[in-house]
C-alpha cells in the first residue's frame, strides 16, 4: 500500500504504536513488514494474524509479539532523547530511501528532519585513512555540500569521520548500526553531538539499547546508500566494508564513484578494483556533479510501483503449499523460478513465503531470492 508524494496520510497514534510493535516482533523484517501491510492494510490487523501465519508456516516455537507496553516505553525514550519516529509512508520519510527495496519501515531520527529531504551523496572509505585520502574526502564533501548536497555516511573512523566533519556547515546524515543510545565508535560522540547541533541528523532503524553487531553494519550501509543518489568510495582495501556499500549502490541503481590510487597502496586496491568493474572515475567534484544533475532534478532514483501480490484470492489450493515447499531448498531461488517449478500462482506463493518467514523458516537474499533455513 503506497501513496504518491504529497498524499501521505497522517497516522493515528494507535497505528503508529502498532507499527512499532510489528517491526519489533519476532521474524518481522522490513520485507515481511511491507508484505504484511499490503495484505492486511493496517499494522493492528497484521499483529492479530501473526500467530495464525506462524502456525501455518510450521513454527517450531511460539513467536514473541512486541507488547504495547514495550512499544510505549520506546516512544517515551525517543521523546526524552529529543528524537522522533518516521514511518515509511509519512511525508518526512526520505524519498530516495522509500523507493529502495527493503527500506526500513520505521526510522528513529534525532536532529533536523528537513535534512532528509535534500539530495544526498554517500561518502565511504577506509577506517585507516591516509593523509591524502582525508584531504580528498574533505574536498569532495565540502564542494558537494556547497553545491547543495547533504553528505551521508556511517560515522565510522577514518573516511566517514572526515566526510561528516567537512559537511557540518552544509548538512550531514550519520547512520547508526545500533540504537541511538549506543553510538559506535564511542570516540565519535562529540562529532555526533555536533551533527545534531549544526543542522544535520542521526538515523537508525534499530531500537534503543541495541548494541551493534557485525551483521548490523551491512544493514547500516544499506541505509547510507539508500538515502543517497550516489556512492563515492575514497579509499578501500579489497576486504573493506566500503565495497559492500558500492555493491549495494549498484544493486539499488545508484551511481557508484571511486577515487583511483597507486597500485602499490593497499588502501587503493578496492577502489581500483571498482573502477575495473565499471565504477565512475572520480578525481574532482565536477565528475560527480555532472553525473548527478539529472537525478537531483528528479530528486529520486526510481518510482514506486504498487505491488499486486495479494490481489484476488491468494490462499493456496489443495497441494499447492506442498509443491512450494518441495521447490524450496537451502540454495537461494528467485520467485520466478519458484513459480515456474511449482506451477503455483504468484499470489499464493507470496502468502506461503510470508507464513514461512513469520515461522522463522525462510531467509531472504539479495535480488529477491529466498531459501529455507537449514
Image (cartoon, rainbow, N blue to C red):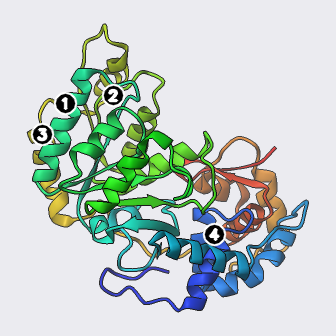
Question: Mark 3 and mark 4 in contact (Cβ < 8 Å)?
Answer: no
Seen from this angle, which residue lies furthest front? 190
Left or right side of 278 for 32: right
Q: In this rendering, which labeled residue sits more in front, label 1 or label 2?
A: 1
Q: Which mark is residue 136?
A: 1
Q: Which mark is residue 23?
A: 4
Q: Position of residue 339 (x, y in %)?
A: 65, 59
* Label 4, label 3: how far apart the Cα atoms are: 39 Å
- Mark 1 and mark 2 lie on one chain; the one further toward the N terminus is 1
For the point 16% across and 51% down, the residue is: 145
* Label 1, label 2: how far apart the Cα atoms are: 18 Å
Question: Mark 1 and mark 4 in contact (Cβ < 8 Å)?
Answer: no
- Mark 4 and mark 2 lie on one chain; the one further toward the N terminus is 4
Q: Which residue is mark 2?
A: 274
Secondary structure under the numbered disc 3 in the rendered image = helix
Q: Using the image as rendered, state which of residue 299 and residue 343 is in the foreground.
A: 299
Q: In this rendering, which labeled residue sits more in front, label 4 or label 1?
A: 1
Q: Which mark is residue 285?
A: 3
Please tell me whether residue 66 is drawn above or below residue 14 in the rendered image.
above
* Label 3, label 1: how far apart the Cα atoms are: 10 Å
* Label 4, label 1: how far apart the Cα atoms are: 40 Å
- Residue 206 lies in what quarter of the image? bottom right
Secondary structure under the numbered disc 4 in the rendered image = helix
- Mark 4 and mark 3 lie on one chain; the one further toward the N terminus is 4
- Mark 4 and mark 1 lie on one chain; the one further toward the N terminus is 4
Amino acid at each position: 500500500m503506497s501513496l504518491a508524494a504529497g498524499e501521505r496520510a497522517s497516522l493515528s497514534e494507535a497505528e503508529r504504536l502498532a507499527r512499532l510493535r510489528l517491526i519489533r516482533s519476532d521474524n518481522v523484517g522490513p520485507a515481511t513488514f511491507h508484505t504484511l501491510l499490503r495484505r492486511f492494510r493496517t499494522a493492528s490487523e497484521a499483529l492479530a494474524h501473526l500467530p495464525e501465519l506462524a502456525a501455518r508456516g510450521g513454527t517450531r516455537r511460539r513467536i514473541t509479539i512486541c507488547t504495547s507496553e514495550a512499544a510505549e516505553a520506546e516512544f517515551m525514550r525517543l521523546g526524552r532523547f529529543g528524537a522522533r519516529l518516521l514511518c515509511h509512508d509519512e511525508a518526512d520519510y526520505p524519498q530516495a530511501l522509500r523507493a529502495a527495496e527493503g527500506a526500513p519501515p520505521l526510522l528513529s531520527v534525532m536532529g533536523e528532519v528537513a535534512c532528509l529531504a535534500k539530495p544526498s551523496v554517500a561518502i565511504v572509505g577506509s577506517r585507516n585513512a591516509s593523509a591524502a585520502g582525508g584531504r580528498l574526502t574533505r574536498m569532495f564533501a565540502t564542494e558537494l555540500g556547497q553545491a547543495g548536497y547533504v553528505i551521508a555516511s556511517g560515522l565510522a573512523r577514518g573516511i566517514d569521520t572526515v566526510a561528516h566533519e567537512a559537511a557540518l556547515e552544509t548538512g550531514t546524515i550519520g547512520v547508526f548500526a545500533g540504537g541511538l543510545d549506543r553510538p559506535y565508535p564511542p570516540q565519535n560522540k562529540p562529532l555526533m553531538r555536533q551533527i545534531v547541533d549544526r543542522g544535520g541528523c542521526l538515523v537508525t532503524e534499530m531500537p534503543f539499547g541495541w548494541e551493534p553487531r557485525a551483521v548490523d553494519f551491512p544493514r547500516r550501509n544499506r541505509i547510507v546508500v539508500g538515502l543517497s543518489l550516489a556512492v563515492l568510495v575514497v579509499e578501500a582495501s579489497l576486504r573493506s566494508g566500503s565495497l559492500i556499500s558500492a555493491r549495494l549502490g549498484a544493486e539499488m541503481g545508484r551511481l557508484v564513484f571511486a577515487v583511483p590510487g597507486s597500485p602499490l597502496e593497499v588502501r587503493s586496491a578496492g577502489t581500483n578494483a571498482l573502477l575495473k568493474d565499471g565504477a565512475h572515475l572520480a578525481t574532482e567534484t565536477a565528475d560527480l556533479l555532472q553525473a548527478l544533475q539529472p537525478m537531483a532534478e528528479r530528486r529520486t532514483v526510481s518510482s514506486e510501483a504498487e505491488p499486486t501480490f495479494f490481489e484476488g484470492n491468494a490462499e493456496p489450493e489443495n497441494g499447492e503449499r506442498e509443491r512450494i515447499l518441495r521447490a524450496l531448498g537451502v540454495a537461494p531461488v528467485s520467485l520466478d523460478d519458484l513459480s515456474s517449478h511449482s506451477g503455483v500462482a504468484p499470489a499464493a506463493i507470496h502468502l506461503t513465503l510470508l507464513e514461512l518467514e513469520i515461522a522463522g523458516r525462510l531467509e531472504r537474499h539479495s535480488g529477491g531470492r529466498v531459501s529455507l533455513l537449514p
